[in-house]
Structure formats: structure tokens, C-alpha cells
Image: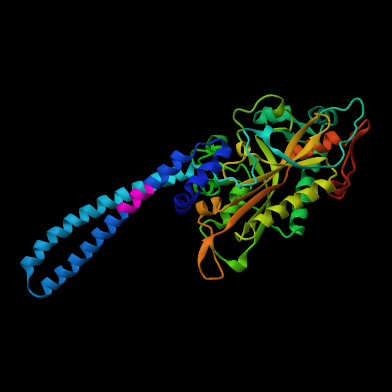
């Protein structure tokens, strides 16, 4: 969430930057400033009314002590009127605060200068490309055919017990899935990330804290009777561990990792992009998150990108890195790098990770602050990234490592799987 003081100071610059998102934000920014001016005017009247009421109360007490009861009772009538006015102003102030909060919740983060302009994922900037695309045998198949051939994932069983987009992993497919989770967690903890196990449902405050609400409300599964949400990513519960906290500068950085299943309605998704593991309603993901001093978050983002690169190179998967354009940038992000693995059998790039810097956008919602070296409090910066999302990594392994005699397992995963081939 943007800070109203910053909006007042940088209104025109923010409006220009938000045009990268194809958003005419100037009316929203001006409305926010107007509401805040109303709120401040009401607060000034409220402060004045309270001061008058307190002054009269003291005067009434002195009059009673002096035996001037009649005069004191006359003034008491005035204090009653002031109390009524004070209550009206308090209600008006709360209404203005709520109205401003609602508006600020719906203004996206400001893209950094390096974010390219653009309308969709077709306008994302390719930063680099790595690895050789393998040459597959003549009868190579996409993963949704391979999993049936080797009986390792059953989409029909998942549809039977839940619905489309909820696959059942079987036999070596289940073991490979578990191996990937453990491998990712081990790589992350070795890099200094503390492993966390967190709930898979969150309350509304947590959803608002990291920006999934109200922006992604229709895409989250909601348990209405308990007013809880199934998490779309471990980012939500792990970041909210520090909601409302005041940290010390020496506590930073805080680096965490966690594995969770993720749940997304993916409303409106259709076509070839949703086949097999390409897009699911429930999938597994290992996340990395950082809480950083504002001076260090840009460098931290670069380090997270390098960390994900190292994992993909160890898995020997061809990949590329994209800098997302304004039109494809997530609501809460100021800068995002996407990683895509090339699926040789599908002849397309599959997104496997997003690494983002949110700066103060989440921490302002979370009221996540730290005390700096001067003893003053300021908002921390938050970052997160997929390290990694399993479905498309698994699809990339199955398709790129297939041979006429079976599917080879990447060398880095063999110790975790206990086998080197699916056949």
C-alpha cells in the first residue's frame, strides 16, 4: 500500500510511473489526497473540541471547589454539547480513514524505472537465456502423455475425487515430487534461509497484509463459514509472521524459506496453457522470502535471482530470465524477474519462478517496521521468490529428460529420489 505522505509529495511522478501499468491513476491519487485533507481537517476540529471540553471540565471543577455551583452547572450544559460534537467528529474521522484505506488498498505499487512499458507478457524483456535446448528423439511426447505411459501422475483420478486441476501423483511420480521439495529446501537452507512450516489457511488480515486482498479475492478459495482463505503461495503466511512487528536494524536481513501446497481458482484460464501440469488449482511450491533494510533490497533481489539461476543450472534445464513489463507486473511488485524453462516437447517456455521486490508496499500494509541506527522507526522492505514452483519444473524434467527407453533423472536429484530412471 502506498503511503499517503509519499502520494502528496510525488503525485505526478507516481501517476506517470503507473502509466506503465496502463493505468490512469491520477484521479485515484488526487482523490486520496482530497480524502486525507478532509480527514486532517476533521482531526483538527476534533482536537480543538477535545481541548475546549477539557478546559471546561477543569473550570467546572474549580467553580465547584469555590462554591459556585450554579455557574458550574451552566458550563456543564456546554460540555454536553461538546461531547455530542466530539462523537460526531470521531465518526466522521473514522469514516474518512476507512474511505482512504479502501482507496489505497486498490492502488497498485509503483513500477521501478527499469520496468519496461508494455501491455502483456508479450512485451516482457528477455534479460538472458541459458543452457542448450536438447534434441529429443522422433517419438518424444508432452508430459501429459508421458505420465500416463509411466503411470506416475493421474489427472483423471484427481478429477474423480475433487475436480480438474487437482492431480494425483503416484509411484515414482510421487517420489520425484517429494525429492524436488527436499532438494529445493536443502538448497535454500544452505544459502542461509531459515526453514518455516506454516498454516495453509490464513485470515483476512493476512490476505490484506501481503496484498492478495482485495486484488485477488476472486482467485482465492474462501472458507466462508470460518472466513479463512486457502493460501495461493507460502508468501502470505510467512510474510505475515512479522505483521505488526517492530524490529531492530541488527535483526535484518531476515531470510526464510518454506514448502506449502498452493491453491488458486485460476478463474478464466483455458486453452492449451492449462493442459497437464501447465496450470493447476492445487500445486506444490517452495518459496524464499526476505525482510531487508531499504538500503539493501535491490542487492538482495539480485542475489535471489542468482540463487534461482544456480538451482536451474544444477538441474541442467534450459531457461531464460525476463524482466516483467508494466502491463504484466503483479499488483504488489515494484520489479519482478520471471524464470522460464523451455519445454522441448511442447515447444514453449513455461514460467517456473517469479522473484520480486515489493519495497514498502507490503510492509506499510503489515505495519512491519524497524528501528534504524538513529533510533527512528521506518518501514522495512519485503521480497519473495519461487525457489521453485514444482509443476512446470516437473514438466520440464519429464519432457527434456525423456529418452526412447524412459525418463532420466537429473544428477542433482538422484540422491533424493533413490532412482535414476523412470521406465
Span colored in magenta: 35-42
User: In the rendered image, which quarter is residue 30 located in?
Assistant: top left
User: In the rendered image, which quarter is residue 54 located in?
Assistant: bottom left
Residue at horizontal 45%, vertical 54%?
5
- In depth, the one of 210 and 419 nearer the eye is 210
- Magenta-drawn stretch contains 38: yes
Q: Position of residue 231 (x, y in %)?
A: 60, 43
Residue 297 in view:
yes
Q: Position of residue 416 (x, y in %)?
A: 83, 49
- In depth, the one of 154 and 277 nearer the eye is 277
- In depth, the one of 94 and 122 nearer the eye is 122
Residue at horizontal 63%, vertical 52%?
383
Q: Position of residue 357 (x, y in %)?
A: 63, 50
Q: Is residue 41 left or right of residue 340?
A: left
- In depth, the one of 299 and 381 nearer the eye is 299
* Helix, strand or loop: magenta stretch: helix
**Rendered-image quadrant of the C terminus:** top right
Q: Position of residue 113 (x, y in %)?
A: 62, 47
Q: For the view shown, which residue lies furthest in the right direction?
A: 405
Q: Is residue 244 above or below residue 171?
A: below
Q: Is residue 367 above or below residue 407?
A: below
Q: Is residue 365 left or right of residue 41?
A: right
- Which colour assignment does the render follow? rainbow
Q: Is residue 395 left or right of residue 375?
A: right
- Magenta-drawn stretch contains 120: no
Amino acid at each position: 500500500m502506498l503511503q499517503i505522505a509519499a502520494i502528496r509529495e510525488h503525485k505526478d511522478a507516481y501517476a506517470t510511473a503507473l502509466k506503465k501499468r496502463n493505468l490512469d491513476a491520477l484521479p485515484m491519487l488526487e482523490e486520496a489526497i482530497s480524502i486525507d485533507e478532509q480527514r486532517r481537517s476533521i482531526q483538527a476540529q476534533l482536537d480543538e473540541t477535545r481541548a475546549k471540553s477539557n478546559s471546561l471540565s477543569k473550570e467546572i471543577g474549580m467553580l465547584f471547589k469555590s462554591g459556585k455551583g450554579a455557574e458550574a452547572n451552566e458550563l456543564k450544559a456546554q460540555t454536553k454539547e461538546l461531547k455530542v460534537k466530539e462523537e460526531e467528529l470521531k465518526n466522521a474521522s473514522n469514516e474518512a480513514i476507512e474511505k482512504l484505506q479502501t482507496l489505497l488498498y486498490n492502488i497498485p505499487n509503483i513500477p521501478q524505472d527499469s520496468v519496461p512499458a508494455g501491455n502483456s507478457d508479450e512485451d516482457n524483456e528477455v534479460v538472458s537465456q541459458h543452457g542448450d535446448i536438447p534434441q529429443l528423439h522422433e517419438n518424444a511426447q508432452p508430459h501429459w502423455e508421458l505420465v500416463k505411459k509411466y503411470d506416475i501422475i493421474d489427472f483423471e483420478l484427481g478429477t474423480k475425487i475433487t475436480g480438474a486441476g487437482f492431480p494425483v501423483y503416484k509411484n515414482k511420480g510421487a517420489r520425484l515430487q517429494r525429492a524436488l521439495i527436499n532438494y529445493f529446501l536443502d538448497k535454500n537452507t544452505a544459502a542461509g534461509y531459515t526453514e518455516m512450516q506454516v498454516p495453509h489457511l490464513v485470515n483476512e488480515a493476512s490476505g490484506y497484509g501481503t496484498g492478495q486482498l482485495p486484488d485477488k479475492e476472486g482467485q482465492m478459495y474462501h472458507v466462508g463459514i470460518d472466513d479463512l482463505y486457502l493460501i495461493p503461495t507460502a508468501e502470505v503466511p510467512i510474510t505475515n509472521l512479522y505483521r505488526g512487528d517492530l524490529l531492530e536494524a541488527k535483526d535484518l536481513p531476515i531470510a526464510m524459506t518454506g514448502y506449502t501446497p498452493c491453491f488458486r481458482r485460476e478463474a478464466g484460464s483455458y486453452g492449451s496453457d492449462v493442459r497437464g501440469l501447465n496450470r493447476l488449482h492445487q500445486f506444490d511450491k517452495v518459496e524464499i522470502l526476505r525482510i531487508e533494510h531499504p538500503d539493501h533490497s535491490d542487492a538482495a533481489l539480485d542475489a535471489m535471482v542468482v540463487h534461482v539461476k544456480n538451482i536451474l543450472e544444477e538441474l541442467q534445464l534450459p531457461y531464460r530470465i525476463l524482466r516483467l513489463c508494466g502491463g504484466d507486473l503483479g499488483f504488489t511488485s515494484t520489479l519482478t524477474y520471471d524464470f522460464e524453462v523451455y519445454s522441448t516437447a511442447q515447444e514453449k517456455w513455461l514460467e517456473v519462478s517469479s522473484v520480486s521486490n515489493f519495497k514498502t508496499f507490503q510492509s506499510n500494509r503489515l505495519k512491519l517496521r524497524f528501528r534504524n541506527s538513529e533510533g527512528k522507526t521506518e518501514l522495512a522492505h519485503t521480497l519473495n521468490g519461487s525457489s521453485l514452483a514444482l509443476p512446470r519444473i516437473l514438466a520440464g524434467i519429464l519432457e527434456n529428460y525423456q529418452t526412447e527407453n524412459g525418463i532420466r533423472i537429473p544428477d542433482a536429484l538422484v540422491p533424493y529420489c533413490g532412482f535414476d530412471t523412470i521406465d
